[in-house]
Image: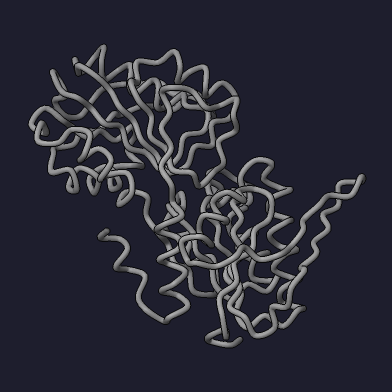
Amino acid sequence: MNLHGKDIKIFTANSNPKVAAEIAKQLGLPLGQSEVVTFSDGEVSVSIKESVRGSDVFVVQSTSSPVNDNLMELLIMIDAFKRASAGRITAVIPYMGYARQDRKAKARDPISAKLVADLITAAGADRVLSMDLHCPQIQGFFNMPVDHLLGVPILAPYFVEKFGDNKENVMVVSPDLGSVTRARNFAQRLGVPFAIVDKRRQKANVCEVMNIIGDVRGKSVVLVDDMIDTAGTLCNAAKAIIDIGGATEVYACATHGVLSGPAIERIQNSVIKELVLLDTIALPAEKQIDKITVLPVAPVFAQAIERIYSDKPVSTLFNT
């Protein structure tokens, strides 16, 4: 493995080409010439249409829905660059699918996040650049450097600007115990207190809100999470904050908008005034509603890529 390529080249598959194009634009580079298509039987075909010999190649691909198709596109692109003698290959995965399957929750469960990490390694990647992995320990599943960016430094300034100097009536709330650290960091950036919604999950994608740890009465609340899938947890937490906690209004934000199943309908019918997401996952037109605001991640990823190429620390981006 070369420690450094002779130049930077940005390529993309099909999951989020808009973000890849914006990253390339931020770096003042053209997007790499490639084609990723699917044969009639479902097999993925990749064509790299320019030389990458000795280059520092960055492949931008979120492994979002359709997860398996996008994962295979990423793996095959990495293999193509490896066989084309790229100097160094970095898998830029704004959203990593299978990250929630990071441990054995019950007997005979697979640890799919580890399997995906092994597949990316076997394909030939030298480095991974991602954002808000569901569990930070997933970095240890890779036997290579992993640069783990955070969504909070992008989301927090949006709410700082929204509330301005009227922060005395603002409170950050974690929708569950698993997001406490993220909510605490978010609250510190806003300079406001935080609370926790304690819930008991009955079964997958169904949860029952029990109580609120902290006083949110009369407050404008910001719910903070890493991802929103079916939006059940988020909408139940928002309802409890209003009905049980007595908050005046609820906003929400998350890094990854998976938004599967009934998510959009739930959000539209919820008490949430505004949901702020990052574009780590492309938001199709049918899911774009007035309540959802999307912020770009390309500037942060572009800075990270520039720093990786220049052998500078990426950690400074955490304090943006």
- Farthest residue, direction right: 40
Residue 110 visible in the picture: yes
Tell me where residue 196 sits by quadrant. Answer: top left
Q: Quadrant of the C terminus?
A: bottom left
Position of residue 312 relative to residue 318, above or below, is below
Estimate the x, y position of residue 148 in percent, counting from the top left: 42, 62
Image height check: is 266 above or below 114? above
Q: Residue at x 27, y 44 (%)?
A: 156
The residue lying at 35 percent from left, 27 percent from top is 199
* Rendering coords of residue 279 (x, y %): 49, 44
Quarter in which the N terminus is drawn = bottom right
| In the image: residue 302, left or right of residue 317 | right
Residue at image coords 68%, 64%: 119
Residue under the image location 80 percent in, 64 percent down? 47
Residue 77 at x, y percent in the picture: 72, 64
Q: Is residue 26 left or right of residue 64?
A: left
Q: Is residue 98 visible to us here? A: no
- Left or right of residue 17: residue 278: left
- Above or below: residue 98 compared with residue 162: below
